[in-house]
Each structure stands twice: as structure tokens, then as C-alpha cells.
Image (tube, coloured by chain):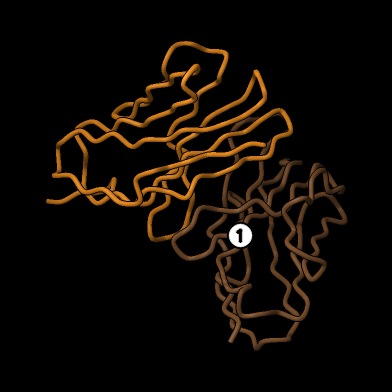
Chain colours: A orange, B brown
């Protein structure tokens, strides 16, 4: 079975600080994809960053980077120089070869001015 | 259209009624997903279409839920004999075949009173 676990229901950080959101997953597949999605109050799910499991190099997108630990099945998201616009729900997700995307329960992130 | 369109944006219905939720995917996207997101939770997989056929409907909670995609484009999620527990945001997403990025609509908030 494919599962995704986010153990931090809510986090708050000051603007310009760095914050790390945790995620662990479980899958029996050898090749899969991992994602972080952002969901602001508008409900629109926005892809923040993706990681292919067979790539050892951690993905980076501007201020967003991941720490992918395949053996530990860990996939954390680091947001550097956090901005007020980063306030949102963040969901970790995985996708196997069957193309089904499974989401975690989310972390509500507050960036404080 | 430019993005995934879901209608209506909000729907209030009485317990026991039948509802239809519509999803208009991005043109050319053959893969289409339906998710249900309860308050404070992550999106829960319902069904995945590849073209006109349901490739995976393992997430449909019971036989009151049904989805169709007759021409491989627009999809309709149908809920019979609605219950208060069906109240949630229903999200639709679409992607190109084999792509790892799914684009989400803004969802339909269903409230059963």
C-alpha cells in the first residue's frame, strides 16, 4: 500500500526565516515520484516541487528545496527566506507507476510578519 | 480553457438528494482524477480516468458515488442519496499521459444539509 505521513499539523515561523516541513512515505515500488503541493485559501492546489525517486540529487526550485532520503523514506521540504505569501497548507504526495497520487494530511504553515 | 474548470464552485443540497459535479480538464489531458477533501484533511483519492475509461475507481467510498467521462474530456461525478458525511470539497485534476504534474481545479464545495 502507498501511504504518506505528515506529522506536523501546524507550524509558524517569522518572515525571512527558514522552515522545514517533514514527510515520510511508504511504497513497495522501486520507481516513484514525490511531490510537495501548496494549497492557499483559494483551494487551488499548486505544485511546488517534485522529486523522481531514481534521482539521488535533491530537487530545488528557487527558495524551495527538498531533502530526499530514500532509504529512510523521508522527503522534507525546506523553504528559505520565507515570505508572507508562503502561508498556506502544504501537502506531501507520492505517485507510483499506477499514476495514482496519494496525499498526506497536510501541514498548515503560517508566516508571521 | 487555460486551466481545469470545476462547476459549480459551491453546491448546497438537502440530505437524500442527487448531485452532479462537473470537471472540464485542460485540453489534451487524457488523465483525469477526482479527489475528496474533508475539512482539515488531505485530498483523498476517489477515481482516475485514462481517456474514457476508469483506470482505477478503488477510492469511491460506496455505490452512491459514480463518475463518467463519456468522450474522454469532461467528467461528471455523481452522488446519489447524499448524506451529511458527503460534505467536502471535491477536487478534479488532469494531466498529459505519463506526465508527473497534475493540474488541479479550484474544487466544488459540497454542503449537504
Q: Quadrant of residue B69?
A: bottom right
A15 and B9: which is toward the camera: A15
Q: Report the residue marked by disc 1.
A: B36
Image coordinates of residue A98 in percent, x first then y, are: 74, 33
Residue located 49% across and 18% down the image = A70
Q: Quadrant of residue A33?
A: top right
A82 and A71: which is toward the camera: A71
- In the depicted structure, whether residue B83 falls above or below residue A79: below
B93 with respect to A72 (left or right)? right
B13 and B73: which is toward the camera: B13
Residue located 86% across and 53% down the image = B71
Dot 1, how many residues are within 10 Å of its Cα: few (below 14), some (14-19), or many (20+)? Answer: many
Image coordinates of residue B52 in percent, x first then y, are: 86, 48
Image coordinates of residue A1 in percent, x first then y, are: 67, 37
Residue located 70% across and 65% down the image = B22
- In the depicted structure, whether residue A61 falls above or below residue B18: above
Amino acid at each position: 500500500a502507498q501511504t504518506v505521513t505528515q506529522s506536523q499539523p501546524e507550524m509558524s515561523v517569522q518572515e525571512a526565516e527558514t522552515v522545514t516541513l517533514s514527510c515520510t512515505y511508504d511504497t513497495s515500488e522501486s520507481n516513484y515520484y514525490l511531490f510537495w503541493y501548496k494549497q492557499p485559501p483559494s483551494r487551488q492546489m499548486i505544485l511546488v516541487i517534485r522529486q523522481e525517486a531514481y534521482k539521488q540529487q535533491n530537487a530545488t526550485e528557487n527558495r524551495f528545496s527538498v531533502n530526499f532520503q530514500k532509504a529512510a523514506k523521508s522527503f522534507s521540504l525546506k523553504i528559505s527566506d520565507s515570505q508572507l505569501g508562503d502561508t498556506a497548507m502544504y501537502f506531501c504526495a507520492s505517485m507510483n507507476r499506477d499514476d495514482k497520487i496519494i496525499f498526506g494530511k497536510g501541514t498548515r504553515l503560517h508566516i508571521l510578519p | 480553457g487555460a486551466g481545469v474548470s470545476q462547476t459549480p464552485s459551491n453546491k448546497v443540497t438537502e440530505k437524500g438528494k442527487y448531485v452532479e459535479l462537473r470537471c472540464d480538464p485542460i485540453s489534451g489531458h487524457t488523465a483525469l482524477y477526482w479527489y475528496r477533501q474533508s475539512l482539515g484533511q488531505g485530498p483523498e483519492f476517489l477515481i482516475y480516468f485514462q481517456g474514457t475509461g476508469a483506470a482505477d475507481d478503488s477510492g469511491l467510498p460506496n455505490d452512491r458515488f459514480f463518475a463518467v467521462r463519456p468522450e474522454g474530456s469532461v467528467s461528471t461525478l455523481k452522488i446519489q442519496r447524499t448524506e451529511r458525511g458527503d460534505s467536502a470539497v471535491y477536487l478534479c485534476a488532469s494531466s498529459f499521459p505519463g506526465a508527473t504534474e497534475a493540474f488541479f481545479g479550484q474544487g466544488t464545495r459540497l454542503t449537504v444539509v
